[in-house]
Image (cartoon, rainbow, N blue to C red):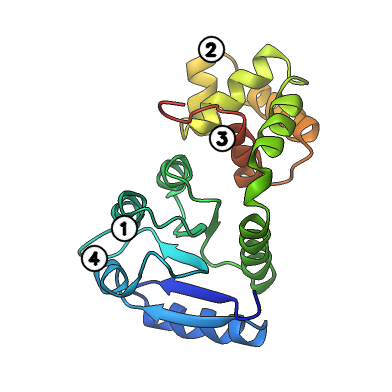
Amino acid sequence: MNDRIVFLVDDDEAIRHSASFMLRHAGFTVKTFPDGLVFLDSVKSEDEGCILLDVRMPGMDGLAVQSTLNRRGINMPVIILTGHGDVPVAVEAMKGGAIEFLEKPYEKKALVAAIENAYELLDNQATDDRRGREAAAKLSALTPRERQVLECLVEGLTNKGIAEALSISPRTVEIHRAHMMEKLQVDSLSAALRIAFLAGIGADGH
């Protein structure tokens, strides 16, 4: 796809301006929207591209926008933009199909990498079954405790929350989490969650 379009939905005008400037310089075509309702009025099922979606917006939050897109059968890859402390909301968004979340303030490199990844997913949608099998194989390397830690992360729990849920110390959680990330060959929570969801952990009704 030559014309790689990014739909940027964020009520913060400064972020819309700076992110669209960055992305245009990186070679993307950017369409910006000040809130979810304006975006939903504009987007069509035949549109192709990637959606950058802010979680906290007045009127209609990102999760509601995402839910509406799903109902309409609009399945462009969604990257969630979240403020500090919104990780449980971002996890909920990933359960709804978002491919990644970025915490503000995000670096240009991370933003561009996330969008490149979204386009890679678009190009490789036919390989979903293979990716699911690969994810399941990676999970099979985890110990039962490491898998429990991952399942707790899927539920949106913090390290402290995991420690309480599993009756172990936060330090022990950190050790299990580090081992789990190493075995999954990932360096971010969103990447670990992607593998979990591909393998069917936390996929409601799957």
Which residue is under mark 2?
167
Which residue is under mark 1?
65
Q: Amino acid at mark 2?
A: Ser
Give the alpha-carbon distance from disc 4 to disc 2, as whole Å. 39 Å
Q: Are marks 2 and 1 in contact (CB under 8 Å)?
A: no
Q: Earlier in the sequence, mark 4 or mark 2?
A: 4
Q: Amino acid at mark 3?
A: Phe
**Crowd class of label 1 (few under 14; some 14 to 19; many from 20; radius 10 Å):** many
At horizontal 64% and vertical 55% (from top left) the residue drawn is 121
Closer to viewer: mark 4 or mark 2: 4
In this orientation, which residue lies closer to the viewer: 162 or 118?
118
Callout 1: SS: helix
Specify the quadrant of the image occupied by residue 180: top right
Side of 105 where 130 appears, left or right:
right
At horizontal 48% and vertical 44% (from top left) the residue drawn is 94
Callout 3: SS: helix
At horizontal 73% and vertical 35% (from top left) the residue drawn is 181
Q: Amino acid at mark 4?
A: Pro
Callout 2: SS: loop
Which residue is under mark 4?
58
Q: Are marks 3 and 2 in contact (CB under 8 Å)?
A: no
- Where does residue 62 sit, x and y in percent of width and height? 34, 57
